[in-house]
Image (cartoon, grey):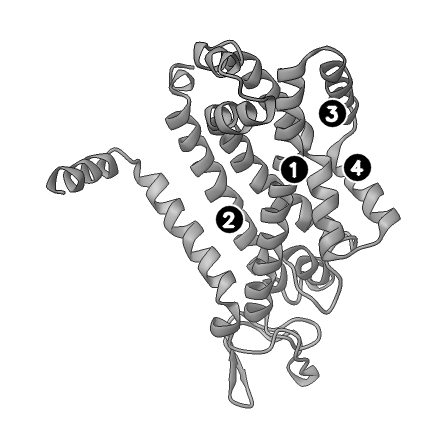
């Protein structure tokens, strides 16, 4: 037990300070989003027109609006906290959808080869030739806005990157001796793929998922900003900034508060993703 504690301490000392800081920041944002109903000082949808466009620190009827109010007198802090739940929820579920679809197709293409490989990889080439944000905008415009529709649209537009990584990694792992031994022992393709191949390609997939997580948050915010994502009265960071742009000169805090939160979250995820890539792929350190 003493050796384990010592090993943990030695490992923590090797973690860069920047990674520790962004990890704490990321954890704080996630916790505030999860416990938003307990932390938020007011109802995010409660409108008080007599308190509209008030600066941070304004008090009205016993409620202090620490980060000001929007055009309908709603508390910006509360809406930002609830918006974090929406943005994080869409990002997490979208990454799960794209990971499941992309990794499954990539492993199938890398394992079975032949016409399966040709069809899947040509489909990947077609999807990669279309800008993801443009495809997402067109799809949402056709299907209509909504939380679940947004998750499916974002998830099904970003799977090709996972497919390429899973395909390349599966080709390498498929020729390893223990895979051949499993085949000779009579193991089926499904068992080999999920019990032997998948654990050995999980590292690169995790790196891609970390990078895609930040991108999903930006795409959700962009679609909501354009009015194609989360609809009123529900709050998301993009929709809050979309409302605030009309009052940027009079009430800059409506845009600044969710904008800063969006920047900190994506920045933290990217820094953590770069460090994770270095840990899981030592070859990248020398580049």
* Residue 171: mark in rendering: none
For residue 186, side relative to residue 277 (left or right)? right
- Which x, y percent locates residue 45? 66, 75
Mark in the foreground, 1 or 4: 1
| Label 1: how many Cα within 10 Å (few below 14, some 14–19, many 20+) | many
**Alpha carbon distance from label 3 to label 1:** 14 Å
Comparing labels 3 and 4, the label whose residue is closer to the camera:
3
Residue at the spot of label 1? 98
Residue 148, picture quadrant = bottom right
- Evaluate if marks 4 and 2 touch, with contact meaning CB atoms under 8 Å apart: no
The disc label shown at residue 128, or none: 3
Closer to us: 53 or 24: 24
The image quadrant that residue 49 belongs to is bottom right
Looking at the rendering, in which quadrant would you find the N terminus? top left
Q: Is 7 left, or right, of 253 in this rendering?
A: left
Circle 1 sits in a helix, a strand or a loop, which is it?
helix
Instruction: Provide residue 165's location: percent of width, then percent of height.
Output: 59, 22
Which residue bears the numbered disc 2? 265
Q: Residues within 10 Å of mark 4 (few under 14, many from 20)?
A: few
Q: Which mark is residue 134?
A: 4
User: Closer to the camera, 118 or 125?
Assistant: 118
The percent position of residue 178, horizontal first and vertical second, equals 44, 14
């Amino acid at each position: 037990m003493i050796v384990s504690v010592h090993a943990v301490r030695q490992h923590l000392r090797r973690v860069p300070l920047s990674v520790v800081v962004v990890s704490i920041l990321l954890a704080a944002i996630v916790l505030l989003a999860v416990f938003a109903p307990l932390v938020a000082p007011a109802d995010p949808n409660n409108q008080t027109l007599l308190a509209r466009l008030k600066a941070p620190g304004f008090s009205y009827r016993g409620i202090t609006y620490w980060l000001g109010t929007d055009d309908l007198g709603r508390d910006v802090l509360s809406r930002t906290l609830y918006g974090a739940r929406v943005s994080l929820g869409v990002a997490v579920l979208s990454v799960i959808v794209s990971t499941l679809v992309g990794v499954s197709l990539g492993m199938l293409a890398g394992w079975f080869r032949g016409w399966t490989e040709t069809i899947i990889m040509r489909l990947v080439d077609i999807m990669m030739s279309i800008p993801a944000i443009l495809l997402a905008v067109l799809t949402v415009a056709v299907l209509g806005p909504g939380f679940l529709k947004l998750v499916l649209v974002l998830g099904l537009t970003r799977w090709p990157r996972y497919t390429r990584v899973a395909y390349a990694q599966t080709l390498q792992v498929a020729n390893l001796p223990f895979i051949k031994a499993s085949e000779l022992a009579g193991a089926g393709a499904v068992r080999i793929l999920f019990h032997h191949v998948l654990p050995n390609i999980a590292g690169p997939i995790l790196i891609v998922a970390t990078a895609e997580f930040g991108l999903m948050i930006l795409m959700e915010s962009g679609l909501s900003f354009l009015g194609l994502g989360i609809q009123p009265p529900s709050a998301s960071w993009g929709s809050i900034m979309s409302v605030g742009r009309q009052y940027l000169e009079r009430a800059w805090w409506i845009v600044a508060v969710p904008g800063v939160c969006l920047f900190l979250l994506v920045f933290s995820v990217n820094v953590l993703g770069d460090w994770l890539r270095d840990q899981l792929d030592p070859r990248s350190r020398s580049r």
